[in-house]
Amino acid sequence: MHTQNKNLYCVIMAGGVGTRFWPVSRQQRPKQFLDILGTGRTLLQQTFDRFVKIMPEENILIVTNKIYKSLVMDQLPGIHDQQVLLEPSRRNTAPCIAYALSKIDSKNPEANVVVAPSDHLILKEEAFLDQVMKGFAFSEQNPAIVTLGIRPSRPDTGYGYIQYIQEDSELEVFKVKTFTEKPNADLAKSFLSSGEFLWNSGLFITKTKVMLHAFQKYLPEMHQVFMDGAGNYYTETEEAFLEQAYAQCTNISIDYGIIEKADNVYVIPSEFGWSDLGTWGSLYENSTHDTNENAVVGRKAMLYDTKNCIVNVPNDKLVVVQGLDGYIVVESDGILLICKKDNEQEIRQMVSNVKVQRGEEYI
């Protein structure tokens, strides 16, 4: 058990829609609110359970879209209204982090914060928490933004990569050299063989004042908006202030807006059984398989002459599948998707087409 420090905070980003998990993940109930792994806990609940082991429960904040407030409160019944930060509109990750850190900073300027996605899989929890604590120790002593980089196990083209400078470091915290967005297959292979690259886990640790200083430098207008509004935090005017603040924010990710530009970014090479669960394929990789390499969720699914498939259907639905190899078969709320696993990157486009041709209610 880790000792609890009142200056440690966590911001869980839970506002995304998870289009690539359609039709199970829908606008009304995105994947972070689903028990997509069949464990009895949703991805958001699992993320919360993880961080509550190393910090006071009241220091964990959830940033989400205002339409998901009741989902968050239902799934995390112990939390206070003030821990749920409600975005009025979707503006990517930079505004949500500027808002959360400005709010924390207004109450505790000594805060040391881990910012984490709500929908990632972490199989080795203890190893993960040890690395987070190592990151906290480093950011407490240094004006740094510390990322966790995952040692790559294959030349995956679906992840961003972090190149780091390999030098002696007692703390196993290394200076970041470059960030690379999703590479093509040849580049991914060369990254893997060089041994200098890690997958970008999308998680980082920093003191609030260090990150707010980076906002001031790289996204000054956004920084100004949330600084000017600081008097509204923890008051009844916060919601009205946010409406107007978000209207002024550009739609930009924290990676692109700050982390890829800043010169004080460090990385801790890590292995803790991580996946961003971004796609049906990544869920397939992280599920248990039957003797024909099928990953099946759904008690009444019957498979014949079928292999290498992911089948995800409700427990009360009888589904019979014959003769498929390498397919995604998913049914949810009257929507059926059958798609080759190799073509799953096309699901996003399919969802756009459904929206145009069949209407919002199917999204």
Image: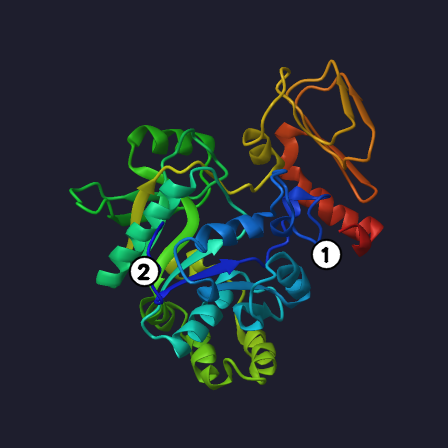
As drawn, the label of residue 103 is: none
Residue 333, percent from left and from top:
81, 45
Residue 285, percent from left and from top:
55, 29
- Closer to the camera in the image, 314 or 309: 314
Occupied quadrant, residue 170: top left
Please name the amino acid that badge 1 sits on.
Gln
Please name the amino acid that badge 2 sits on.
Ala
Mark 2, Cα crowd under 10 Å, few <14 / some 14-19 / many 20+, is some
Where disc 2 sits, the SS reads loop
| Residue 242 seen in this snapshot | yes
Residue 209, percent from left and from top:
33, 71
Q: Which colouring convention does the figure follow? A: rainbow
- Closer to the camera in the image, 186 or 334: 334
The correct choice, above or below, for 323 with respect to 130 in the image is: above
Q: Specify which label sits upstream in the sequence, 1 or 2.
A: 1
Where disc 1 sits, the SS reads loop
Residue under numbered circle 1: 28
The mark total stands at 2
Mark 1, Cα crowd under 10 Å, few <14 / some 14-19 / many 20+, is few
| Residue 161 seen in this snapshot | no
As drawn, the label of residue 262 is: 2
* Side of 141 relative to 247 (left or right): left
Residue 25, percent from left and from top:
68, 47
